[in-house]
Image (cartoon, rainbow, N blue to C red):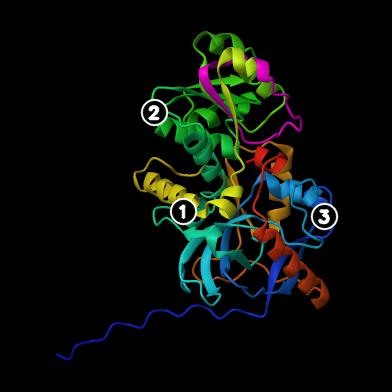
Amino acid sequence: MPEQSAPPAPSAPPVPARMPAWRVVANGEPEEVMELGDVEVPEPGPDEVLIRVRTVALNFPDVLLARGQYQVRPDLPFTPGIELCGEVAAVAPGVTRFAVGDRVVGWGQGALAAYAVLPATAVYPAPPGLDDVHASGLTIAYQTAWFGLHRRAALRPGETLLVHAAAGGVGSAACRLGAAAGAHVVGIVGSPAKVEAARAAGAHEVYLRDDDWVTPLRRRGADVVFDPVGGAAFEQSTKVIAFEGRIVVVGFASGDLPRVRPDHLLVKNYSVLGLHWGLYQRVRPQRLDEAHAELCRLVDDGVLRPDVSDVVPFEDAADGVRRLARGVTTGRIVVRVADDATGDATRDVARATSDDDRAAADGNRAAAHAAPGAGRGEAAR
């Protein structure tokens, strides 16, 4: 019987000239300033990758970018969305980390579109153990939590970890990674509806933000505090920090910048550590690769699976960002941009002007290379 040859591998779908994309056309509340339009597909520049987007995990910086309150302010109009899972559609000459067809996750401006261009250093292989919906939320929140707990605070097994906003995106990631590291995790949440979400993320004890959590924690002390809130949360944390404890400042979701008292640091022997996760991409990008490898190991071991509360269709992305702005979500909201099998966007939309397209593409590329920094954006993660 003649030997049969293997069927040819399926070729990647051709890249179209235009694509549907969400646009922020002014600064304001997301549901008022986000519009669905039709723009030119961007081309990857030096050291960049073009990704056919499948899913986008929403983050609080999406809210701040729409409002014009983020530390990076792209020129209007621009395409929002900063965290995705998709498939490599094209690579720039000289990029060897990826090939067309690779399934990847990544972060950078312009994800809420059928295609997005990202720096190759901000793209990683997608873990096989996660589907597109859950893989899209693996990068920003979990890397931020991993760097805060392990690189900055050097969390050790048996220590007590206090996590503020424990039911939020970055807070729940910190709870899960802290529990995986063998810490006793104490979560602080803003409402009774979020208590179970924090417990499900790995918190062993959960307190409401407005209750007295200082008195019970002061007795044993918190060895590490993970603080994406700032303001009163930071001030109260200094009352429960243990001898040689470490407070990791991730951001200021409260909008209030706390005052650090050097005399208090001295007499209580504790440290305050800042975390600007995005800066590692510019200064030590290999550290992000190491963190991604560790997160993938935890996925493979069955320890880690990003929490997803809702999956919304592409045409409802603005409403998803609105819900995030209201602070009523637990777990991640994920936007399904394309069908996994075809890569087709979920909706055809009206065409936009080509001049606006080019301006948006240039603005998105500049913002994609501007790593997310500290401040209110980091606070919400």
Q: Which residues are magenta?
A: 239-263
SS label for mark 2: loop
Instruction: Return the disc, 3 or 2, that comes first in the chain's sequence.
Output: 3
Q: Position of residue 139 (x, y in %)?
A: 53, 50
Q: Position of residue 261 (x, y in %)?
A: 69, 20
Amino acid under disc 2: Gly
Question: Gap between marks 2 and 1, in whole Å?
Answer: 23 Å
Quadrant hosting residue 168:
top right
Q: Which residue is mark 3?
A: 33
Q: Considering the image in quadrants, where does the N terminus appear?
A: bottom left
Badge 1: few (under 14), some or many (20 or more) residues near its Cα, within 10 Å?
A: some
Question: Gap between marks 1 and 3, in whole Å?
Answer: 35 Å
SS label for mark 1: helix
Which residue appears at 43% of the width and 50% of the height?
A: 290
Quadrant hosting residue 169:
top right
Which residue appears at 58% of the width and 13% of the height?
A: 268
Badge 3: few (under 14), some or many (20 or more) residues near its Cα, within 10 Å?
A: some
Residue 182's tag is 2
